[in-house]
């Protein structure tokens, strides 16, 4: 496997975590479940279990619903940023391990990607709403689609 590709995928899945914190680990669990990546015998093999798949998938669906609620806090607030960094690091480490790479390098790229996705995604979403004079809801749905489809695309490239 091309190591530059693996590093790009690790960064990319981190960006997905910045957009939707629980989508990144959910798609990585699906990648393991569908045998796109092999985690057997690794410290991250738990990401390939049915329990992890169900938990992260339900968390991702819950987050997508919660994102549309009026009282949901901004993704740029400290608790949310930290969660996105953790899930970005975990997801990227899992992908790199699945490709035979270093979990630490993957985790670092995932954390950096999560920060880019968190703050960049916020800027793109708010500026798009303003530029289109649109309600936030349809732009949020578009962001959901980008996160889910983009995450599955990245996880399936290994």
Image (cartoon, helix red, strand yellow):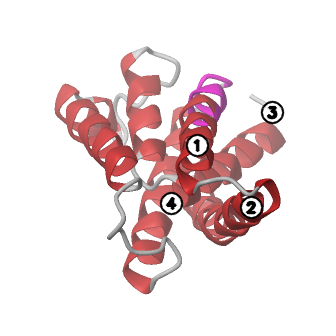
Q: Nearer the viewer, mark 3 or mark 2?
A: 2
Q: Which badge, 4 or 2, is on the more N-terminal residue?
A: 4
Q: Name the outermost residue toward the top.
A: 34
Q: Which mark is residue 29?
A: none
Label 3, residues with CA under 10 Å away: few <14, some 14-19, many ≥20: few
Real-space CA distance between mark 2 and mark 1, rounded to the nearest whole angstrom: 14 Å
Q: Nearer the viewer, mark 4 or mark 2?
A: 2
* Residue found 56% across the figure and 60% down from its top: 18
Real-space CA distance between mark 1 and mark 4, rounded to the nearest whole angstrom: 29 Å
Magenta segment includes 58? no
Magenta stretch, main secondary structure class: helix
CB atoms at circles 1 and 4 under 8 Å apart?
no
Real-space CA distance between mark 3 and mark 2, rounded to the nearest whole angstrom: 31 Å
Identify the residue under disc 2: 124
- Callout 2 secondary element: helix
In-image side of 11 versus 156 (left or right): right
Real-space CA distance between mark 3 and mark 1, rounded to the nearest whole angstrom: 37 Å
Identify the residue under disc 3: 2
Q: Which badge, 1 or 4, is on the more N-terminal residue?
A: 4
Q: Nearer the viewer, mark 3 or mark 4?
A: 4
Where are the magenta residues, as a range?
Answer: 150-157
In-image side of 35 versus 156 (left or right): left
Real-space CA distance between mark 3 and mark 4, rounded to the nearest whole angstrom: 20 Å
Q: Which badge, 3 or 2, is on the more N-terminal residue?
A: 3
Label 1, residues with CA under 10 Å away: few <14, some 14-19, many ≥20: few
Q: Does 64 appear above or below 87? A: above
CB atoms at circles 2 and 1 under 8 Å apart?
no
Frontmost residue, 132 versus 96: 132
Rendering coords of residue 46 (x, y %) = 26, 39
Identify the residue under disc 4: 89
Q: Does 69 appear above or below 24? A: below
Magenta segment includes 154? yes
């Amino acid at each position: 496997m091309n190591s530059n590709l693996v590093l790009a995928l690790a960064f990319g899945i981190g960006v997905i975590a910045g957009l939707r914190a629980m989508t990144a680990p959910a798609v990585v669990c699906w990648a393991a479940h569908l045998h796109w990546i092999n985690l057997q015998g690794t410290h991250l093999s738990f990401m390939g279990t049915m329990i992890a798949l169900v938990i992260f998938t339900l968390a991702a669906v819950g987050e997508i619903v919660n994102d549309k609620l009026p009282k949901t806090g901004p993704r740029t607030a400290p608790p949310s940023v930290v969660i996105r960094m953790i899930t970005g690091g975990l997801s990227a480490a899992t992908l790199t391990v699945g490709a035979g790479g270093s979990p630490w390098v993957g985790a670092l790229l995932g954390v950096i990607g999560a920060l880019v996705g968190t703050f960049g995604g916020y800027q793109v979403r708010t500026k798009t709403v303003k530029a289109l004079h649109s309600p936030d809801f349809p732009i949020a749905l578009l962001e959901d689609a980008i996160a889910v489809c983009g995450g599955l695309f990245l996880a399936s490239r290994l």
